[in-house]
Amino acid sequence: MNELFVTTESGDLLLSDTTKRSRRIRNRLASIWMAGSVLVAVVPLALVIGYVLIKGVGQLTPDWFTKDLPAVTRRAGGGMGPAIVGTLLITAVAAGMAVPLGVLGAIYLHEYGGRGRLGRLIRFMADVMTGVPSIVMGLFVYTVWTIAHGLSAFGGALALACLMLPIIIRTTEEMLRLVPDELRQASYALGNRKWRTILTVVLPAAFGGITSGVMLAIARAAGETAPLVFTIGAARNLNLSIFNGPTTALSVQIFGNAQTPFEAAQARAWGAALTLVAIVFILTILARIVAARVARRHNA
Amino acid sequence: MAIGRSDMDITPGGSSGGAVASLHGAGPGRRADQLFHSVALIAGLLVLAILGLIAASTTHEAWPAFRSQGLSFVTSSTWIPAEGKFGALAFIYGTVLSSLLALLLAVPVSLGIALYANEAAPSRIRRPIIAVLDLLAAIPSVVYGLWGVIVLAPFLGPHVYSPINDAVGSWPVVGWFLNGSSGRSFMTAGIILAIMITPIVTSLSREVIATVPRAQREAAYAMGATRWEMIRLAVLPWGRGGIVGAIMLGLGRAMGETIAVALVIGSQAGQVTTHLFEAGDSMAAVIVNQFGEASGTHRAALVGLGVVLFVVTIIVNVSARSIVARFDRQAQGI
């Protein structure tokens, strides 16, 4: 137990006989609570990842990645190809919209109007917007896009982009804050205008951090389900078109198959879960590596 | 920003006059500067525009339901689409109950982890803890839902809820709550939600705890406090505001969570009960479960549920952010 805690001044005091027994016991109980909490969090993580790995890995045959979804979900067979492509396509289109807009929004907040009343309002509302439930984003896109234009990958991408936008704004702003002012001043001293300074000096300096934040936002969006249910529909076949016709995604397939009592469908849900978790983890780990490299460069 | 000369006008966010006037003055390239400024401003304003548009478009779409139901939309718990009756009270109840259960389970654990990571753990254990939280946060909610509905709920129903119900279900007070034996229930939804909000409540609490001045800790130790007494006397009172904000943000997250809850809450429309081990329904779960086969006023009513959810989560988030912001100012001020 003792190696789980740093010894501090209190650690030495604990050993002294002058500390009352009841205080020592209370301190020990608090220590057990704190270390026990970590254990409580590890258990579900291990269980979920364990189940996804064990139940999902059997599904991952070559067919899984290439074949269309089966016509009858309760029978085995078919693949998850359209959903894998759908997830990647929708997420990529969403990132294509949210990343430039989010970075520009952050540039406004940090390089232009950040301390004014409007800047503070936008920053506050971006924080609030990160709390808007994803299903509300789905309903929103349904009302402004899907009713008029029908189910498509683009509708799902719009909803995911709305979810990513405030995250990218806030993480990018944090990264811009780390860029030393001397860089900006040096650029101005060379006669660069502000827009040039931002594009050629500030953004490259913050590139690593921004990339890391963007990848985390993409990872979160890739796992979203609720906003896609109303906006992309449920196709069985590969649909590479962004604007035309329904498509499908891994998360939607997990949701649909998890609700059925059929073993083959549930197995497909586990396989899709493993595929999705792998995609999300790879993005997360890449983001960590980039972030670590940036941190090292900062320290150097 | 801790640079001594940062009050020069060139600094970002500062007023754009003064020393850099020449860079903003007439001459080639001035247009480009103005254009870039405008584009960035428009991107920033997009946040406000989207929030406004969400409120306007969903309210408009839900209007037929609001008009036909009036106030009974939120005061009645009769939800019978075939008869045109849309009272969402039971769903609001389910959302609030499952979220509060999640807080009840997640807050002690999150605070424990945050205090352990910041106050007690040796640095080589700290990093794995953060990695665990990052992984917990990275797993998509639909995967938690899948695990919840196929593994957790079938286990909890017969092996946990049923024995508890048999033991204490007929007692007064306790039995009002610990009653029922359905694997898919308010309680299971609360457990899954608790797992999902633990990372965010923990990481926000850690940020708050990290701002406690070292002098306060040292002072408590100097008085002979044990570690726990130091936490209770120096850390928790200081961080109270920020921790409350973190918990409220967790509440907002829990209330809006859809897919995992839709899979494990049991979808028993119209049920308002204190029995935690019985099936119920939440606003988000009803929307996603019924949207496919809904049309007309039914569909409008489902969008209306989204409006209610939006308003409630906005209120929770604005209050939470205000509390956190006030805490930040206080922490910086001292």
Image (spheres, grey):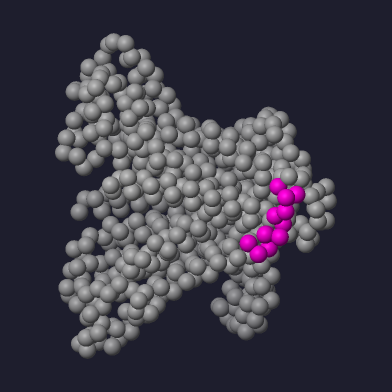
Which quadrant holds residue B141?
bottom right
Along the viewing direction, whichever of A80 and A18 lies nearer the viewer: A80
Q: Is the magenta stretch mostly helix, strand or loop?
A: helix
Give the magenta part as a residue range: A53-65
- From where the camera sits, is residue A97 visible? yes
Q: In this view, does A161 lie above or below A14?
A: above
Along the viewing direction, whichever of B284 and A126 lies nearer the viewer: A126
Quadrant (top left, top right, bottom left, bottom right) of the C terminus of chain B: bottom left
Residue shown at 47%/41% (left/top)? Answer: A214
Which quadrant holds residue A228?
top right
Q: Where is residue B150 in the image (x, y as percent from the top left)?
A: 69, 64
Q: Position of residue A32 (x, y in %)?
A: 40, 77
Which quadrant holds residue A141?
top right
Q: Position of residue A115 (x, y in %)?
A: 29, 35
User: In the visual, does B79 lie left or right of B252?
Assistant: right
Residue shown at 22%/24% (left/top)? Answer: A189
